[in-house]
Amino acid sequence: MRSSLLSALCLLISAASAQVIATGALKRTMWDGQRSGLIAMDSLSEPGLYGMGPLEHMRGEITLVDGRSHVARVMGDSLIVQVDPTAKAPFFVHGRAAGWEEIPLPPRVESAQQLDAYLAVMSANEPFFFRLIGRFEEVDIHVWDLPTDSTFTGPMEGARYKRHFSMKGMEGEIIGVFSRHHRTVFTHHDSFIHLHFLSSDGRVMGHVDALKFAAGELVLVIAKP
């Protein structure tokens, strides 16, 4: 086990040199009302690019997977996910992966909070992208759904405009980014990670609020520079 953990640490140190680029900032969008699009997904439509952020004007979520822009919107009570290269985001984080390296996922890691803590112990100082792929026991996500005539100041007030969805036993993947240096830029003030979920069939996607999983049913991979 010790040798596998040392190997995993070496992989994370290597992965930390992969480029991670932030556009805008969560704090500016949530507190200052900067919600117009600052980056267009058609500028990121290259294989190997991954990223995440809200849809402009807080009317959905965007997850970039291998250069394909998946956009989740709420229509009535339904969640609609489409590939939309014209989408824009008020803040976004993206990076390039030349490939992926698997690292061990200990049995004790079975939630988003425990994954955050595990990566914090294992990782080097620089930010990196990762993916968690397989079957999830529970996935709780939200998708922004701010009406055109509404606004808010701060996350507490804005929470009323998040639409929540919960799934059990769903196949798919987490696209995640880890950073010690970007709290309130692209991670929340109390976390080192920002997570989006995309189901295997492409019909469910959103910002992850909570996860429950068994390590034996998932593969954790880290972006190679």
Image (cartoon, rainbow, N blue to C red):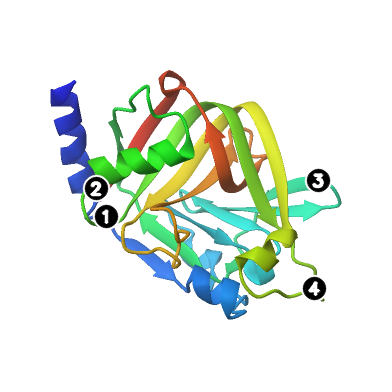
Vertical order, 134 against 25 (above or below)? above
Gap in Å between the C-alphas at discs 3 and 1?
A: 37 Å
Closer-to-camera residue (199/158): 158
Residue drawn at x 60%, y 30% is: 138
- Helix, strand or loop for disc 2: helix
Is any atom of residue 140 visible in this view? yes
Q: Label 4: few (<14), some or many (≥20) within 10 Å?
A: few
Q: Nearer the viewer, mark 4 or mark 1?
A: 4
The residue tagged 4 is: 148
What type is the residue that disc 2 sits on? Ala
Question: Which disc is residue 78 wearing?
Answer: 3
How many numbered marks have been drawn onto this rendered protein structure? 4
**Which numbered disc covers residue 18?**
1
Dots 2, 1 in contact, CB < 8 A: yes
Query: What residue sits 58% from the left and 46% below the top?
Result: 209
Q: Residue 15's mark?
A: 2
Residue depicted at x 24% and y 52%:
16
Q: Where in the figure is residue 192, as x and y percent of width and height?
A: 38, 53
Asked if the residue at tag 1 contacts the one at tag 3, i.e. Cβ–Cβ closer than 8 Å, the answer is no
Q: Which labelled disc corresponds to residue 68?
A: none
Q: Quadrant of residue 53?
A: bottom right
State left or right for residue 6 relative to residue 45.
left
Q: CA distance from mark 3 to mark 2?
A: 37 Å
Neighbour tally class for label 2: few under 14, some 14-19, many 20 plus, Cα within 10 Å: many
Q: CA distance from mark 3 to mark 4?
A: 18 Å
Q: Position of residue 220 (x, y in %)?
A: 37, 33
